[in-house]
Amino acid sequence: MREVTTRLEECRLAAEEKQRLLINSELRLNTQFENLANRIFEQTGRRTDEQNRQSLNNLLAPFREQLDGFRRQVQESFGQEARERHTLAHEIRNLQQLNVQMAKEAVNLTNALKGDNKIQGDWGEVVLARILEASGLREGHEFRTQVNIKAENNSRFQPDVIVHLPQGKDVVIDAKMSLVAYERYFNSEDQHQRELALQEHISSIKGHIRGLSRKDYQQLPGLKSLDYVLMFIPVEPAYLVALNRRLSCLMRHLNTILCWLAHQHY
């Protein structure tokens, strides 16, 4: 019994030792398995992350390029806009200076035209020459300015413009400019003063017409002129206001004559 008991005790101890070894082996295997699983998971995760990163980069690359292109375009646009704003500000300053200069020159021209008949006439001739050039005529070819002509009685005449027409014909244009009375008519607020200025303006135009008639340009030697002379008035409103007044007067005279004829008939 002692021998059997001893063997059993030895077997029990051996079994416990084997069990302890198995448990230790199981623990080591579990630890190794966990470590291996962790390494595999980490490698798989890194590989998956790399693949995902690469896929994401491939997916986002066109969008990133578009963003870069849009950023460059925006920067270029802002730069161009800044340069244009600078240029625009510079041009606006130049324009302001030009407007001030033009205003001064306009005032000087207005003052000169108001007070000097010679300057008024020269200005009218310049306007007439520019109109002829804008119509396609060439100075020295289709028209001439300030031509000195000596008449038979040794007197000299200087028509403002001679226009050469087809078939060897000429027409004389004389530029007349008088703004003194018209300026008073235009700027006066008193109706009576406006009426006086208008009458003076109309009388001035009539005086120019009579003066041209006395010069008899169409009879000058060397000219194949028509039997009339054109008088050029460079300020159209000045011409229209005089024409409207004369037409009104003519209509009143015509109505008076018609009324008198009707009264005589009855």
Image (cartoon, rainbow, N blue to C red):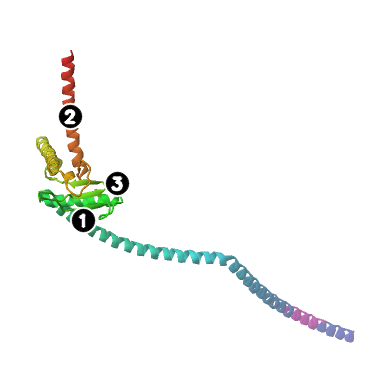
Q: What kind of residue is marked 1? A: Met
> Is 5 on the left-hand or right-hand side of 201?
right
- How far across and down, in percent of the image, does residue 63 sit? 55, 64
| Dominant secondary structure, magenta | helix
- Mark closest to the chain's N terminus, 3 or 1: 1
- Mark closest to the chain's N terminus, 2 or 1: 1
**Residue position for label 2:** 250
- Callout 1 crowding tier (Cα within 10 Å): few <14, some 14–19, many ≥20: few
> Is 61 on the left-hand or right-hand side of 239?
right
User: Does the magenta-highlighted stretch encompass residue 23?
Assistant: yes
**Mark 2 against mark 1, which lies toward the viewer?**
2
- Callout 2 crowding tier (Cα within 10 Å): few <14, some 14–19, many ≥20: few
Q: Secondary structure at mark 2?
A: helix
The quarter of the image holding the N terminus is: bottom right
The quarter of the image holding the C terminus is: top left
> Is 1 on the left-hand or right-hand side of 49?
right
**Residue position for label 1:** 102
The magenta span reads: 15-27
Do we see residue 189 in this rendering? Answer: no
> Which is nearer the eye, 173 or 126?
173
Q: What kind of residue is marked 3? A: Gln
- How far across and down, in percent of the image, does residue 78 sit? 40, 63
Q: Secondary structure at mark 3?
A: helix
- How far across and down, in percent of the image, does residue 81 sit? 38, 62
3 relative to 259, above or below:
below
Q: Circles 3 and 1: CB distance less than 8 Å?
A: no
Q: CA distance from mark 2 to mark 3?
A: 37 Å
**Residue position for label 3:** 167
